[in-house]
Image (cartoon, coloured by chain):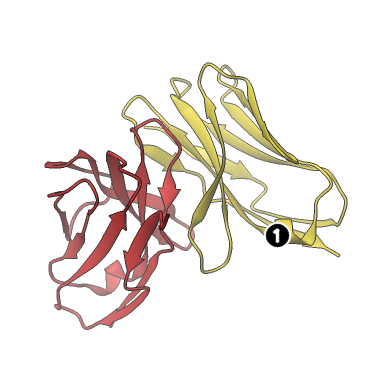
Amino acid sequence: NAGVTQTPKFQVLKTGQSMTLQCAQDMNHEYMSWYRQDPGMGLRLIHYSVGAGITDQGEVPNGYNVSRSTTEDFPLRLLSAAPSQTSVYFCASSLTRATEAFFGQGTRLTVV
Amino acid sequence: KQEVTQIPAALSVPEGENLVLNCSFTDSAIYNLQWFRQDPGKGLTSLLLIQSSQREQTSGRLNASLDKSSGRSTLYIAASQPGDSATYLCAGQGSNYKLTFGKGTLLTVNP
């Protein structure tokens, strides 16, 4: 049982480049979400999804897009990377919106 | 807007000591409260989840309590061990079902 899998683990981008952070879970969880973790700021919610085909914005959505075509996958797209998006990104899933959350190991992104 | 505060920001204790980590939240209409552990460079591991209707949850040497009226939760760690060294995060889930995290307490248990 793999849980929540994020790829890649590390990534360096140049300003203006685009990329997709992958997140997959094998627990048949309905609820998935993306957070970024910055020193002194804690974890902040970027986007979330309550099921396939349904997504919504979190606290810091600007510069990011998401889609949820299947229950298992919830990719996060950076449209035009900026240095302010340098951060550690975590994907999480839970059976419902109000049950225990499981986190991936994170993607450390640096934008130069 | 829910705000979650964790005190202290860092704590260093000798091995074997019992300790308490504190978490406070501003919105008493909390749906549940979760405690997580994060090791350096790793993801978050769920430790305990307390539903709003519950007062406490226990798992091994860990006990978490929830007092909605005062906006507080505590994580009690009994007989601490060096392997308990990590950052501990609490997160409140409000009526909008979104998790709001505190900034964490960095715990160091010295052998």
> Taking B50 as reference, is B101 above or below it?
below
The answer to which of B60 and B36 lies nearer the viewer is B60
Location of residue A27 in the rendering, given as x and y in whole percent from the top left corner = 35, 46
> Taking B3 as reference, is A32 above or below it?
below
Location of residue B62 in the rendering, given as x and y in whole percent from the top left corner = 71, 39
Q: Which residue is mark 1?
A: B85
Badge 1 amino acid: Ser
> Taking A40 as reference, is A31 above or below it?
above
| Image quadrant containing the N terminus of chain B | top left
Q: Which residue appears at 80% of the width and 42% of the height?
A: B78
Residue sitting farthest toward the front: A1
Location of residue A15 in the rendering, given as x and y in whole percent from the top left corner = 19, 80
**Taking the image as drawn, is residue A33 in sight?**
yes
Q: Quadrant of residue A66?
A: bottom left
Chain B hue? yellow
The red-tinted chain is A
Q: Would residue B13 be found to the left or right of residue B56 on screen?
A: right
Location of residue B7 in the rendering, given as x and y in whole percent from the top left corner = 65, 44
Judging from the image, mark 1 belongs to the subunit labelled: B
Q: Which residue appears at 24% of the width and 50% of the height?
A: A72
The secondary structure type at the circle numbered 1 is loop
| Image quadrant containing the C terminus of chain B | bottom right
